Amino acid sequence: MKTVLIGVGQAGGKVTSSLVEFDHDMGFDAVKGALAVNSAKADLQPLDIDTVLVGQDRVKGHGVGGDNELGAAVMQSDAGEVMSALDGRITAEAEAIVVVAGLGAAPGPAGRRSARELNKVYDVPVYAIGILPGRGEGAMYQVNAGRSLKTLVREADATILIDNDAWHSSGESLEEGFDSINDSIARRVGLLFASGENVEGVGESVVDTSEVINTLRSGGVAALGYASAEADDDPDTNINVVTSVTRNALLTGTSLPNATKADSALLVVAGKPERISRKGVERARKWVEEETGSMQVRGGDFPLDSERLAALVLLGGVERSTRMEEFMQRAKEAREEAKRQAEAREDTDKLFQNDDLDSLI
């Protein structure tokens, strides 16, 4: 799948940069263009991709400070500048446009604005990669993410969710955690983009772009799982390897933990074609059908020169999953708590406006 990436905000820019680096290092050439958009100049400076600084007339390059409404307004007012920067990057070769944004901060609504503008202009699918804040990142981020997710899902053709808690290891600093999460995202999403690109060898049933698009056709929320293991030279020996990595990809390696029920799914088995067991792939595909409850499970190979076999599982329509319900409940509780705190502050303000207290102040 030939893609053009647009990273919105700090998290979106870093993930986009990681995706470009992974695609280049692997020699896939699936990413045909990339652009980072931000209202904070400092966030753009470390990135090794093209950038656009927006909102200069309002925030002077200092960012919007987590203000969702201001972030959306800045993106709307400078949408023309962003679209101009994309002109020439999105050519007839592009098969999809992907907007990448962290949902917990101001870039969430800005990402939604971007998806809306892109859908107006281009005929190819506009997908989003939305990054959910971790449980420890504060109530404000949970509230923002809940609001941003609802609007982003409406504007994008499908939204692949990345849960920060999915790959954050205990003992890591926040910065180290984000770096490892970015690497994990780049590996999974980068392999998904490249899976239709025949890199090494000829597979028996190579995945193409249409299968990715059809898996995401129902729209809504999507998730992506990945796992790999050492492989034997004999494909018959690898039957259990294929089924095992598929199970791990879906049950422990997804971008959205516990999201197994889905409307559709795509299983991609990557590795040397002569090592991929057809029996193993078919068994794994049937297992994915049973586990997801979907009768729309596609499958195929990704020829790749590697000593390992890997399984990539793309799930479409996972908004009814346990993890999504947990997150939306957490966002709701955070919103209610924020409302209570606002009311308490209002009561305090009224107390100090009491004329009886004037003489004491």
Image (cartoon, rainbow, N blue to C red):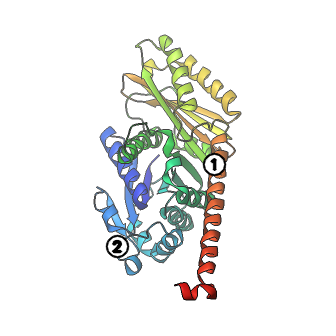
Examine the rendered structure and indicate whether residue 92 appears above or below residue 56.
above
**Residue 90 appears anywhere in the view:** no
Q: Which residue is mark 1?
A: 217
Picture coordinates of residue 206, whole percent (x, y):
50, 32
Residue in the foreground of this view, choosing between 104 and 23: 104
Q: Is residue 299 left or right of residue 94?
A: right
Q: Is residue 341 left or right of residue 59?
A: right
- Could you say which quadrant of the image residue 90 lies in? bottom left
**x%, y% of residue 325?**
67, 46
Query: For residue 293, which quarter of the picture?
Result: top right
Which amino acid does the dot numbered 2 rest on?
A: Gly
Pointer 2 residue: 61
Disc 2: CA contacts within 10 A as few (<14), some (14-19) or many (>=20) = some
Crowdedness of circle 1 by 10 Å Cα count: few (<14), some, many (20+)?
some
Along the polypeptide, which appears first: circle 2 or circle 1?
2
Using the image as rendered, state which of residue 263 and residue 201 is in the foreground: 263
Q: Which mark is residue 94?
A: none
Kind of residue at badge 1: Arg
Which quadrant holds residue 251? top right
Residue 271 placed where, x, y %? Answer: 42, 26
Q: Nearer the viewer, mark 2 or mark 1?
A: 2
Mark 2: secondary structure: loop
Residue positioned 39% across, 27% down in the render: 201
Q: Of residues 100 and 91, which is closer to you in this image?
A: 100
The residue at the point 62 percent across, 55 percent down is: 331
Can residue 284 be seen at all in this image of the molecule? yes
Of the pair 355 and 111, the residue shown nearer to us = 355
- Who's the residue at 51% across and 46% down the image? 162
